[in-house]
Image (cartoon, grey):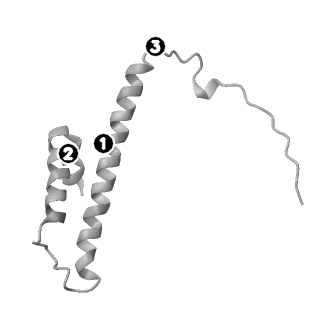
Amino acid sequence: MEWYRNLIRHPKYRWFVIIGTLIYLVSPIDIIPDVFPIVGQIDDALLVTLLVAEVSQLLLDRTKTTKGEKNSDVVVDQPISSATPVDVKSVQVD
């Protein structure tokens, strides 16, 4: 799967993968025909899973990019490791 990860890191190829997956799902030609019970749907389910993961990652990247542009003036005062601890008292509820 390393070749797949390298393929989708490039923005142009990411769109090729998404469009190719959509074409394959709509196409009547399958690697494993849907005539075979369960096994025929496995390749389609796998591709739908990859498609959903890829599109959601694309949307998350776009959201991070737009938030990064809006919050570019935010300055972090303290690193997380040097933050002061907070004491919390817990009570058991029966």
Q: CA distance from mark 2 to mark 1?
A: 9 Å
Expressed as whole percent of the image width and height from the top left, the position of residue 58 reads: 30, 42
Precedes in sequence: disc 1 or disc 3:
1
Instruction: Look at the picture and state if 79 lies above or below 92.
Output: above
Q: Which residue is mark 3?
A: 73
Task: Indicate the amino acid at tag 1.
Answer: Leu
Expressed as whole percent of the image width and height from the top left, the position of residue 65 reads: 35, 29
Q: Are marks 1 and 3 in contact (CB under 8 Å)?
A: no
Instruction: Look at the picture and state if 31 lies above or below 13.
Output: below
Q: Residues within 10 Å of mark 3 (few under 14, many from 20)?
A: few
Precedes in sequence: disc 2 or disc 1:
2
Task: Indicate the amino acid at tag 3.
Answer: Asp
The residue under the point 15% across, 44% down is: 13
Expressed as whole percent of the image width and height from the top left, the position of residue 35 reads: 19, 85
Q: Which residue is mark 1?
A: 58
Q: Which residue is mark 2?
A: 14
User: Residue 24's quadrant in the figure?
Assistant: bottom left
The residue under the point 34% across, 41% down is: 59
